[in-house]
Image (spheres, helix red, strand yellow):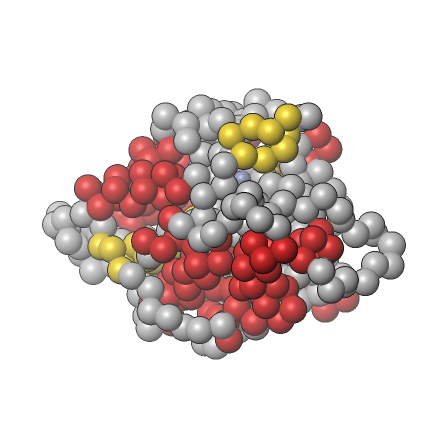
Amino acid sequence: MQRNDLAAAVRLVFDERQLLHRPESYFRRGAFVPHPEQPERAVLLRDRLLRDGHLLTAPRDHGLAPILAVHDADYVSFLQTAWARWCAEFEGDRPAVPNYHTSRRRGRRPEGVVGQLGYHSTDTACPITAGTWEAIYWSAQSAIEGAECVLAGEPLVYALCRPPGHHAYLDSSSGFCFLNNAAIAARHLQQRYARVAILDVDTHAGQGTQDIFWQDGSVLYASMHLHPADYPPYFAGYGDEVGAEAGEGATMNVMLSKGADDTAILTALDALLAAVRRFEADAVVVSLGFDMAADDPLAEVAFSSGGFAEAARRIASLARPTLLVQEGGYLGPSLSENAATFLSAIETASPGKAP
Ligand SMILES: [Zn+2]
């Protein structure tokens, strides 16, 4: 039976306030360069998907509890107040960017905003601006709302999270990410689904997500990404990182080489999907980056539009309740088209949708 347009729609969760974080620049390779994580990304994705007939839902406000189920309370409190404290201390409206970081050795949380900025971030890629808290709060709420829809029985939901989340640790920002939307959603889904798999297909290792669930055997973190030896996040995402204690074996990293093509990327995906099946996941969160696209400004692999479609079909074959959580994917020519292709392919191939 032919699906009509309505039957082929996927619920897309997004809130306009996610556009309020506007980082202008960040420090890269010795210079301040334009920041790639721009609000226009979300506008492009939303508008393109609405043209395809997908259904836009604004998230309800689920409050801080689902966020605090993952993140450190001092960190969340810092994020809420950092901009006001920064402005009170320094005149002007320059973005709050750290210039001190803790070492890997013992370091304590200081009282002042400059020191806390360094304490709660791993890099200079997460400037805090006037609208940052509102944007990251509603980005997380979109993920939580998406998880609520899945808990209510919807088989496939897309949370258009922006700013992204998979680099964020429980108590620090990292790599454009502040709150770990996928981790928050996965934890939220555990109200009903005991075993949740996070399948990360962004081109960067989601080392924040990995770290959050490192000792947790109830959440599988399975990621494919460019080898971190010479690519962010550099310090984690290697193949021998498998989790520890109760989480040993519930972390999987498949590394790609520079220039990896559709065949190599889909082979890596198959290894992740086999792990999800072995794990017997009850539900799946996909950390969905489009920055493997050959024309993405940050990409060093070459995934094609057809590759994204095939990846979507293979993910659908897991036949589990699935929440897609937007991660990376920057302002390259094919960004919104790849999202449309992926969503159409995964919806068409998903079981459980009424014909
Ligand atoms: Zn990425």
Q: In which quadrant of the rendered view does residue 204 lie?
A: top right
Viewer-closest of 12 and 162? 162
As drawn, which residue projects farthest toward the front? 91
- For image coordinates 32% across by 53% down, the residue present is 16
Q: Horizontal and vertical percent for residue 3?
A: 15, 50
| Depicted 226 relative to depicted 158: above or below | above
| Depicted 180 relative to depicted 97: above or below | below
- For image coordinates 36% across by 28% down, the residue present is 334
Q: Horizontal and vertical percent for residue 93?
A: 52, 46
As drawn, which residue projects farthest toward the right? 105
Q: Horizontal and vertical percent for residue 324?
A: 41, 53
Considering the image in quadrants, where does the C terminus appear? bottom left
Ligand 1 is found in the corner quadrant, namely top right
- For image coordinates 58% across by 58% down, the residue present is 88
Q: Horizontal and vertical percent for residue 104?
A: 83, 52
On screen, residue 19 versus residue 88, left or right, reads: left
Viewer-closest of 235 and 189? 235
Q: Can residue 254 be seen in this view?
A: no
Viewer-closest of 202 and 197? 202
Q: In which quadrant of the rendered view does residue 313 lie?
A: top left
Viewer-closest of 181 and 227? 181
Query: How many numbered marks are there?
Result: 0
Q: Is residue 92 visible?
A: yes
- For image coordinates 49% across by 26% down, the residue present is 297
On screen, residue 78 versus residue 288, left or right, reads: right
